[in-house]
Image (cartoon, rainbow, N blue to C red):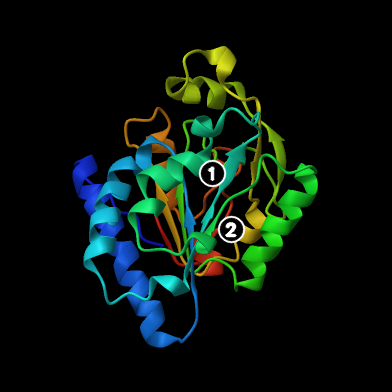
Amino acid sequence: MQVLIFESKQELSKFVAEFVIAHIKKVFDQKNRSFVLATPTGGSVLDAYKELSELGRKNTDIDWKNVHTFALDEYCLRATNFTDSYKYFLKKNLLDNLPLPEENKNFLNYLADDLNQECKRYESKIEVLGNFDLFIGGIGRNGHIAFNEPPITKDSKCRIVELAHSTIEANKRFFNSTSEVPTRAMTIGFKIILKSKLILLIMNKFYVHFEVFLEIAVQQTLSLSYMALDLELGRQKKDCLL
């Protein structure tokens, strides 16, 4: 595992964008198959998505029809709340800015008749495509990744979850008031995350627990006691950048 600390959000964003493009090319060079990318939402990736949108348009040698993207999570919303959805966020800030076929952009459908079945369908599709070649995840204020609130288990599947109060408070900036923030969501679980071939985690160093997370990462073990991720990276020799 590598731990990289950037002095500015601009440096981080540029690194993330260049890393994604380089890794897509690397996988395509090594194997003649699809590339599966996990795309997070939230403020920590906004600038990176601007950089990636620009780089993606410039790199015309990438076969985008073989790139498949998957949102990590989605609010349980009413039909009228599309602009509050993570589908809207991802399409606006990244996916519609890239030459991706529409059918390659994958989202959890909050309008599905059976949300539990929708979670099963979504996880199955990721597995059919060979799991994530690159999982990008932001680390929330309380240590959640996607909407996996700590503590969690390593075999958790895609499912419906109740959001922690701290997560609702952190996300209220995207809504007019706290009361408008959804309290339930669908999220991929750690069973599918841990099958990723490469994991890139992004965290704002101004978060309260940054020093704790960094200490754990340097020790090569990320603990459920502090955050949602329990990779025990050093032992598993899992490729991961934090």
Q: Residues within 10 Å of mark 2 (few under 14, many from 20)?
A: many
Inspect this view and state whether residue 63 appears.
yes
In the rendering, which numbered label is found on residue 1? none
Q: Earlier in the sequence, mark 2 or mark 1?
A: 1
Question: Judging from the image, what secondary structure is the residue with disc 2 in?
Answer: helix
Q: Is residue 216 visible?
A: no
Are the two marked residues, 2 and 1, in contact with CB atoms closer than 8 angstroms? yes
Rendered location of residue 23, percent (x, y): 35, 71
- Comparing 145 with 78, the one in front is 78
Query: Percent x, y for residue 12?
Result: 25, 48
Q: Which residue is painted at 55% across and 49% down in the image?
A: 72
Residue displayed at 48% across by 36% down: 140
Which quadrant is home to the N terminus? bottom left
| Vertical relation: 142 (above or below) 91 | above
Q: Quadrant of residue 136?
A: bottom left
Q: Measured along the vertical axis of the image, is residue 184 above or below residue 114?
A: above
218 relative to 146 in the view: left or right: left
Q: Which residue is mark 1?
A: 145
Mark 1 neighbour class, 10 Å CA radius: few under 14, some 14 to 19, many 20 or more: many
Q: Amino acid at mark 2?
A: Ile
Q: What residue is shown with label 2?
A: 193
Q: Amino acid at mark 1?
A: Ile
Helix, strand or loop at mark 1: loop
Residue 58: image x %, image y %? 21, 65
